[in-house]
Amino acid sequence: MFSLKPPRPTFRSYLLPPPQTDDKIDSEPKIKKLEPVLLPGEIVVNEVNFVRKCIATDTSQYDLWGKLICSNFKISFITDDPMPLQKFHYRNLLLGEHDVPLTCIEQIVTVNDHKRKQKVLGPNQKLKFNPTELIIYCKDFRIVRFRFDESGPESAKKVCLAIAHYSQPTDLQLLFAFEYVGKKYHNSANKINGIPSGGGSGAGGGSSQKTPLFETYSDWDREIKRTSASGWRVCSVNEGYMISTCLPEYFVVPSSLADQDLKIFSHSFVGRRMPLWCWSHSNGSALVRMALIKDMLQQRKIDQRICNAITKSHPQRSDVYKSDLDKTLPNIQEIQAAFVKLKQLCVNEPFEETEEKWLSSLENTRWLEYVRAFLKQSAELVYILESKHLSVVLQEEEGRDLSCIVASLIQVMLDPYFRTITGFQSLIQKEWVMAGYQFLDRCNHLKRSEKESPLFLLFLDATWQLLEQYPAAFEFSETYLAVLYDSTWISLFGTFLFNSPHQRVKQSTEFAISKNIQLGDEKGLKFPSVWDWSLQFSAKDRTLFHNPSYIGKSSPCVQNGAVKSFKRTKVKKLQLHIERDAGFIKEWDPQRPGITSKEKFTNIKSKARPSSADRQPGQWCGAVF
């Protein structure tokens, strides 16, 4: 049996807290008094005392003792013991140091050492043995282990079953965000967690610029004026989602296309997803997204009509270049398969067994190959937009997966505004949230794995690659990208919770009716925006989001003292460095994708692959190389 007091270290280390010199303290009263910090709408559903959290994989020397709690929002381990092996640079105001949001849980494994049994727990399943250990695999690459050697066996079993049940909801309205927002509407002060709710404020403190959410006509109109897109207009034909439930109420179309034409054409597109304007270059060329035309009889006629309208919107009446992303890029299933292999390599396999073949194993996952493919495709389309002055139409079957990545990368490469924090947030809001990217399915919040695919993570990884090459061109830092990815697993923000704006309105309206919440003129409940970073971090911590190398959005990208451009030049070799801790660099030829012209491996150390137990929330792990 283990004692409640952690064993004394056998050596003195300046990295660890000094050993306890006080007299023996009875830890049982402390554990019983430990209570969680709960958010509005959050309730404790089960808990167990005398739990040991395993910190290191090879020793119990640094284990922590405390209480394990399951709420309808998170699992929380509460302890008075200091964390010995890692220091956090910032603190999330919504989550404790040892908390894991329920939507971040990927798999739950219970183990009984004595009977040599283990079971992967699903919702509404029975557990026929008393667990001695609980292993939680998280979507952010963490592995969390708890031991129940000193806990009551029945209490341990109940908390494991509670975690399995609440982490795998069967309905969207069971996600915590609905209970959280429901409390807001019953609060006369109209505050969330003591903070006034509002739109997306920036990452800095004080009077930060708000992020446009593109939920209104005026947001789209301002974007047209910002890009000087004179041949385009804001269309309200989908107001009330009368045409398509996977498009925003307002979007931008060529001025020569009448609303009546759009209504007629919409029936011929997959999902009724009509052409969407994304952005316009200063030379007049435009970037447009479009789903495939399913009506084969009308395909040529409608396609020609759309292309003519885009051509008329160009000052020089330039032709339109169409890029079929389904033919040139990996599909969502291939991306998911690569990510599973990547996670297997980084999380599940012991590093000592894979160290010698680490780079070849990494290459075999194909994750880097796919990141490179999206960067290559985007760079080539940048060349067509900027140098050839042609408008580009991104075609995809539904127009809401691969086109989200490519359209976003093109705009990051060409528009300095989207390399600022506010601009990058507005880009995600415009090209992902409002354009109908299926966050609910692709992030697998309801554990329907057949639709899961980490496309948003791939986009953030590709952005990180650009940030590494052009550090002076980006206002935000690697920390910002990591925290942004971590925020996708916090089921509190409406930003990353739904498949479309229509789903948010429909589901939240139904929830409001069931809870007798008066909405008034509002279109559904107003969920907190992830862009309001003050809900998660203090003003001091938010300074870590800023890149100290940034020299201003009007300045050129500089690398190694030379002015660089994102556009493709006449030199056929385009360098895209894919690196991990400055140890892995590849230079590749865009004419032969997947063929490496020169490989240089230097300074590969074990630190390039941190232990999953050591990964801090917010540390970019697994996706950056």
Image: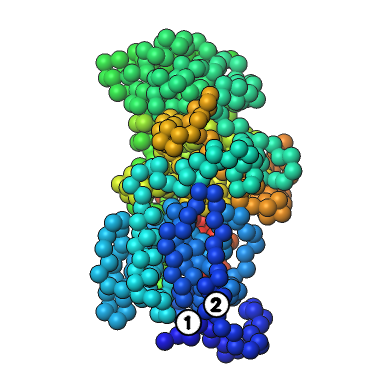
Residue 339 drawn at (x, y percent): 39, 54
Amino acid carrying mark 2 in the image: Pro
Q: Residue 458, can we see it?
A: no
Residue 343, label in figure: none
Residue at image position (48%, 51%) is 489
Foreground mark, 1 or 2, reads 2
**Disc 1 to disc 2, how far (Cα)?**
26 Å
Residue 510 drawn at (x, y percent): 40, 33
Residue 59, label in figure: 1
Residue 29, label in figure: 2
Q: Which quadrant holds the N terminus?
A: bottom left
Left or right position of 440 against 419: left
Between residue 42 and residue 355, name the one nearer to us: 42
Amino acid carrying mark 1 in the image: Thr
- Location of residue 141 with respect to 331 vertically, above or below: below
Residue 4 drawn at (x, y percent): 50, 82
Left or right position of 94 against 400: right
